Amino acid sequence: MLKLQLSILHKFIRSRIMKVGIIGGGAAGLCSAHHVLAMGGMTPIVWEKAAKVGGTWIYTPECGRDKYGLPIHSSMYENLRTNLPKEIMGFPDFPFPEGEASFIHHTEVCKYLESYAEHFNLYPYIQFGHHVEMVTPVLKEDGPPAWNVSVKNMATETTETTTCDALIVCNGHYSVPRYPSIKDISAYKGRKVHSHDYREPSPYKDSTVVILGAAASGLDICLELSTTAKKVFLSHNHPVNIPSEFPVNVEQVRGVVAASDNGFTLSDGTFVEADVILYCTGYEYSFPFLTEECGITVEENIVKPLYKHVIHTTYPSMAFIGIPFQICPFPLFDFQVQHFIASLIHKLKLPTCEEMVSAMEDELAQLKEAGVAPRHYHKFGRSKQLAYMKEVAGEVGCRPFQPYLAKLFIVVMIRLLLDLTRFKNYSYETDKNGCDFKEYNNGVVVNTKWDLTCLIIRRGFHLLWFDFLSITKLVIMFIFKKIKFILG
Ligand SMILES: Cc1cc2nc3c(=O)[nH]c(=O)nc-3n(C[C@H](O)[C@H](O)[C@H](O)COP(=O)(O)OP(=O)(O)OC[C@H]3O[C@@H](n4cnc5c(N)ncnc54)[C@H](O)[C@@H]3O)c2cc1C
């Protein structure tokens, strides 16, 4: 009798526990599982198609497809060291282990994520080798829908469907290459490679390479390639050249507009011959498992309709972690997850669907007014990211991103742009009170203000001297924009 009562009680409790499905066991998925568990009254179920946690940080020399025929997920290359110091990269409640270097090798990030999963006891909730194939909403008369998630066990090739009360999509967005359209590209006889398939520089030995795009990957790969390639053309459309020094065999050139059999015409009319074009042109948001009924679209690089870049405005039981880019990913994920969970348990009252949609539309309209292309809607950068984290953390009452970390972020960004070849030689140490940081260069303490001022003056003069026309054009455009703004 007692056994029966206990089993009924157990069933009752289980039926009351909210089941939260999580797609992906990378940094965002692990962070989601951790906060779902920590909340109590909820249980996570994480589906991960790979055999271990880490997502994009799991390096593989392979390109193309894995042993199950699925596209290789990771875009990691063999020698990658982080472009953010570990002091800002970590989750707020789980710092990276101490160590001298700040810009660490990717294997250390992978280890860090494994120890995060262990520390917060997440492994029992993760199903490895499970590929999410289809998601459909289960509409209810009132309240947000539940979600039917069909998942294929890759080893047994069987598919099962689980119904979840809420769903967090954490499938990463550095996996599906984006290719810009280039006139006559089919005529080009050289090699075409996307950074997703770049692993190490030896295949480019003695070649002339055009790297298309000068964001994080383009810059980093450019430095690596310059060690083996004969010549690297770093092609971009930034209004002025990147003011950093580069190795002697690297030349910054304008964006590519057309191809011929042996090279490329640039937007200033010049022509460069090249053996390889390496596309560092970014990635597409892709959610192949979401059926049309889920109501999510991706247009012009905008995932819609999301409130605060996270919560589905029509079906607020679905969230997307990690959509913004040019961010400090792990801390931002942490805030986003806590925000969504607070909304699930009604600790945070969401605005109505109409209000959430109009908040999104207002943000888009403001961007357009400021002359920003819609495809940069999810691009945060420094100031938008800090304001966003402050707002989101404030709404759910969690500890905001520390101001000294924001300062450290700016220091690193300036060094990256002005001193690309050396910025990873610096390391950082947080003081005991966790309120400030010290900067070291090869083990010697740096007077950051003085050092940065000298660097800015040096590189500023260099830029003025070598790129005077572009700077003048930029200043005139800036003044013109301001006048236009003042005149309404
Ligand atoms: C080359 C490169 C360098 C970077 N350098 C830095 C850096 O220095 N510092 C930094 O902070 N960030 C860096 N990043 C950003 C990095 O992507 C984020 O830090 C973060 O790891 C992203 O985590 P995620 O969980 O959103 O995505 P991912 O790590 O991509 O994880 C997504 C997971 O979802 C799984 N998955 C996808 N689809 C399915 C499916 N249908 N079913 C089941 N599982 C699925 C994948 O297998 C994967 O494990 C870099 C990214 C790249 C590509």
Image (spheres, grey):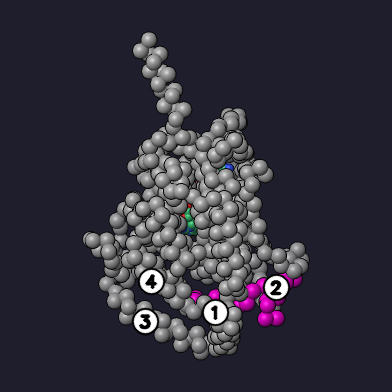
Closer to the chain start, of discs 4 and 1, is 1
Question: Dot 3: few (<14), some (14–19), or many (≥20) neighbours within 10 Å?
Answer: few
User: Distance of mark 2 from mark 3, alpha carbons?
Assistant: 37 Å
Mark 2, residue position: 257
Asked if the residue at tag 1 contacts the one at tag 2, i.e. Cβ–Cβ closer than 8 Å, the answer is no
Q: Amino acid at mark 3?
A: Thr
Viewer-nearest of discs 2 and 3: 3
Q: Earlier in the sequence, mark 2 or mark 4?
A: 2
Q: Residue at x 43, y 64 (%)?
A: 387
Can you identify the residue that label 3 sits on?
Answer: 453
- Tell me the distance, in whole angstroms, between the alpha carbons under discs 3 and 1: 20 Å
Q: Secondary structure at mark 1?
A: loop
* Mark 2 or 4, closer to the camera: 4
Residue type at tag 2: Val
Secondary element at tag 2: strand
Residues shaded magenta: 246-270
How far across and down, in percent of the image, does residue 106 sit?
44, 55
Mark 1 highlights which residue? 241
- Check whether the beta carbons of the residues at disc 2 and disc 4 lie within 8 A of each other: no
The quadrant in which residue 267 appears is: bottom right
Q: Residues within 10 Å of mark 4 (few under 14, many from 20)?
A: some
Residue that mark 4 sits on:
411
